[in-house]
Amino acid sequence: MKGIYTLVTARSVRYVRRMADAMVVIREYISEVEAMIARSVLEAHDIPALVLRDDAGGMLPSMHLVFPIRLAVRRAEATLALHVLDTPFRASTSLDDPLGDADRPGRP
């Protein structure tokens, strides 16, 4: 009987862990490009994200007007993901000089 109780407990722990990692939709987009850029920004900040779309496998892109493309992250990371997406971009280097010192000609 003890072996069965241990097995049930191990399964319930795995179930609880999966529920904690449940996904939640944080944004909806009409443009797939915007959704993919947002996903790339989140993944650059080590936040895994999914782009969910209902467009018949790409055959009916006009369906995005009726069923927007959704961006989903783990429930535990939703607040951080929204903060990352809402924070304005600040360039760390000057846009007038896109090459750093290491990229200048004549340097090995």
Image: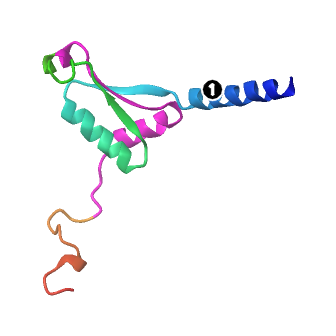
Nearer to us in this view, 51 or 100: 51
Q: Residue at the location (13% across, 17% down)?
A: 62
Q: Residue furthest top?
A: 66
Residue 78 sits inside the magenta stretch: yes
Residue beneath label 1, please?
Answer: 15
Nearer to us in this view, 45 or 1: 1
Residue 10 lies, in percent from the top left, at 71, 31
Question: Left or right of 89: which side holds 76?
Answer: right
In what quadrant of the picture does the N terminus appear?
top right
Q: Does residue 43 sit above or below 31 in this rendering?
A: below
Q: Residue at the location (26% across, 18% down)?
A: 54
Residue 58 lies, in percent from the top left, at 17, 24
Q: Amino acid at mark 1?
A: Tyr
Question: Left or right of 43: which side holds 76?
Answer: right
Q: Residue furthest right?
A: 1
Residue 77 lies, in percent from the top left, at 49, 37
Residue 67: quarter of image: top left
Question: Left or right of 38: which side holds 76?
Answer: right
Kindly tell me whether residue 51 is visible in this rendering: yes
Q: Residue at the location (41% across, 36% down)?
A: 82
Q: Which residues are magenta?
A: 63-92
Tally of marks? 1
Residue 85 sits inside the magenta stretch: yes
In what quadrant of the picture does the C terminus appear?
bottom left
Residue 66 lies, in percent from the top left, at 22, 12
Q: Residue at the location (30% across, 62% down)?
A: 92
Binning the other alpha carbons within 10 Å of mark 1 as few (below 14), some (14 to 19) or many (20 upward) gives few
Residue 7: quarter of image: top right
**Mark 1 element type:** helix
Kindly tell me whether residue 87 is visible in this rendering: no
Render colour scheme: rainbow
Residue 5: quarter of image: top right
